Amino acid sequence: MDTVKHNFENLFLQLGLSVEGKDIETFIQQHVLDAETALEDASFWSPGQSAFIKESRANDADWSEMVDALDSLLRKKR
């Protein structure tokens, strides 16, 4: 039974990214996706991070909702 809360902090931990201080906010501000690039194909992911994102979406896994939310935030207009 999965007891992990599916929030941005835990998603970033799953991706091996820092959650210290404002690190999540900083990451979102520093990374932008254009309309043609799938989230999992973004150049800033490692192969493992990309695979996690792709698998989460393909399997409609527990993380898919948070992955979709991150995708939306990275596509926001600046």
Image (tube, helix red, strand yellow):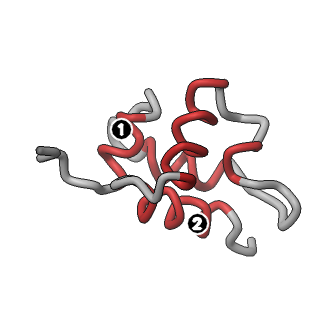
Q: Of 27 and 64, which appears nearest the observer?
A: 64
Q: Is residue 1 left or right of residue 58?
A: left
* Rendered residue at 30%/44% (across/down): 10
- In this rendering, would 13 be left or right of 35? left
- Among the 4 quarters of the image, the one containing residue 51: top right
Residue 34 relative to residue 50: left or right: right
Counting from the top left corner in percent of width and height, residue 40 is at: 68, 45
Q: In which quarter of the image is residue 48?
A: top right
Q: Which residue is drawn at the image coordinates 74% and 75% (left, top)?
A: 77
- Label 2 SS: helix
| Amino acid carrying mark 1 in the image | Val
Residue 2 lies, with reference to residue 75, above or below; the image says above
Answer yes or no: do the residues labelled 1 and 2 have beta carbons within 8 Å? no
For this rendering, which residue is in front, 43 or 54?
A: 54
Could you tell which of marks 1 and 2 lies nearer the N-terminus?
1
Q: Where is residue 38 in the image (x, y as percent from the top left)?
A: 75, 54
The residue under label 1 is: 19
Give the amino acid at mark 2: Leu
Residue that protrudes farthest toward the bottom in the picture: 77
Residue drawn at x 50%, y 56% is 67
- Coordinates of residue 14 in the picture (x, y in percent): 38, 35
Q: Which quadrant would the C terminus be assigned to in this image? A: bottom right
Q: Name the residue under label 2.
A: 73
